[in-house]
Amino acid sequence: MKGLILSGGEGRRLRPITHTSAKQLVPIANKPILFYGIEAMVDAGIRQIGIVVGHTEPEIRAAVGDGSRWGVDVTYLPQDAPLGLAHAVLIARDFLGDDPFVMYLGDNMLEQDLTQFVDGFVAEGERSPSARILLKKVENPQMFGVAELGDEGAVRQLVEKPDEPASDLALVGVYLFDQAIHDAVRSIRPSERGELEITDAIQWLIDRGDLVEHRELQGWWIDTGKKDPLLECNQLVLDTLHTDLAGVLDSDTTVEGPVLVEAGARIENSLLRGPLVIGRGTIVTDSDLGPYVSIGADCRIANSRINHSVLLEGVSVDRVTGLTESLIGREAIIDGPSATSLRLMVGDHSSVALESADHG
């Protein structure tokens, strides 16, 4: 079985961060989102992974490499434009061959692993499935692709963002296919938005009489394509953190709860409230950090209070008391003084100069 990870999207909902970097490489708990998907496939026994890439291909190649760190072979599959999930299958035809494969959206995060989803897909007999989809009960199904189930749990119909949903089961963005999907993606036509929709391809299989199974997701699922869901995902992952103080903490620093300080980081006269992760080479002085903060490598934090935020590598924050629910891009500078609570989304290499209320 092979894996196909889609990482060609432009990430418009995460701008300005994605003006200068791939959305799939934004970190959750100091690990790029894309890496979680690769690790999920590895845990499911997949050793050949194709990554569909767009204009951010050089950055993704630099981060992932040939896959050897995970014990997999990675093949990069350039896509000229994000023309739909079914289009990604179309351009991956040579890589996929006739092997069954898992398709995974590169900015999705799941609590559940893929092992149970993958197990038992290839079976003997006339009614072997051509596809298996992952579904999750949601409160607002009209915002998603929705599945209507028939007898014995087989999928009868898929409808994209229906006004009157037939169920509350939304497509999560993880799919399992055999070679029949290649006939489907060649047979459908672009939707009104000009894309080849994977829901149309799966419906084509259903209408032809193929069996499409489903599995219901256990645990949480988050599309990290916007700031607030990304911060929520960071919180959920940090909730699994265990304390590891590999960096240097002076005697005036206090640690409360699970805190990970990577080797090479230095903390002085600060309060660390877990869950919290601090990257290698970062220096923190006279600050109050956490809970639910991820600070990347080589940052400088001084005289500041930060909670519920993600800071990418190389960020500098000085004299900012009350940074919360924020996403700060690489090498950005946030300079106070500021005595009020701030919610910021700042792009890479930006500089923000603040004034306290006392200065108007």
Image: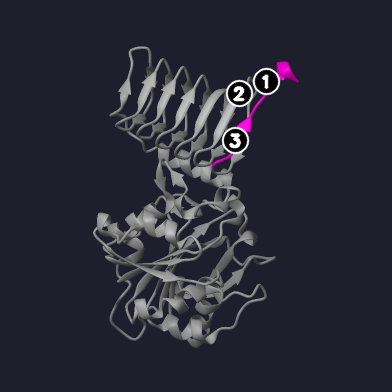
CB under 8 Å between discs 2 and 3: no
Say which amino acid is labelled 1: Ser
- Residue at left offset 47%, top offset 54%: 24
Residue toward you, 311 or 123: 311
The residue most toward the right is 360
Inspect the magenta stretch and tell me whether residue 99 lies in it: no
The residue singled out by tag 3 in the image is: 351
* Quarter where residue 240 is shown: top left
Per the image, label 2 sits on a secondary structure element best described as strand
- Is the N terminus in the top left, top right, bottom left or bottom right quadrant? bottom left
* Closer to the eye: label 2 or 3: 3
Q: How crowded is mark 2: few (under 14 residues within 10 Å), some or many (20 or more)?
A: some
Q: On screen, 151 above or below 137?
A: below
- Residue at left offset 50%, top offset 64%: 8
- Is the C terminus in the top left, top right, bottom left or bottom right quadrant? top right
- Residue at left offset 33%, top offset 82%: 98
* Quarter where residue 177 is shown: bottom left
Say the numbered circle drawn on residue 173: none
Would you say 259 lies left or right of 85 here? left
The residue singled out by tag 2 in the image is: 336
Q: Residue 331, percent across and down?
A: 50, 38
Say which amino acid is labelled 3: Ser
Q: Give the range drawn in magenta.
A: 349-360
Residue toward you, 235 or 80: 80
Q: Evaluate whether residue 267 shows in this view.
A: yes
Would you say 309 lies left or right of 352 here? left
Residue toward you, 2 or 143: 2
Q: Distance between the residues labelled 1 and 3?
A: 16 Å
Q: Residue 211, percent across and down?
A: 43, 79
The residue singled out by tag 1 in the image is: 356
Q: On screen, 52 above or below 359?
A: below
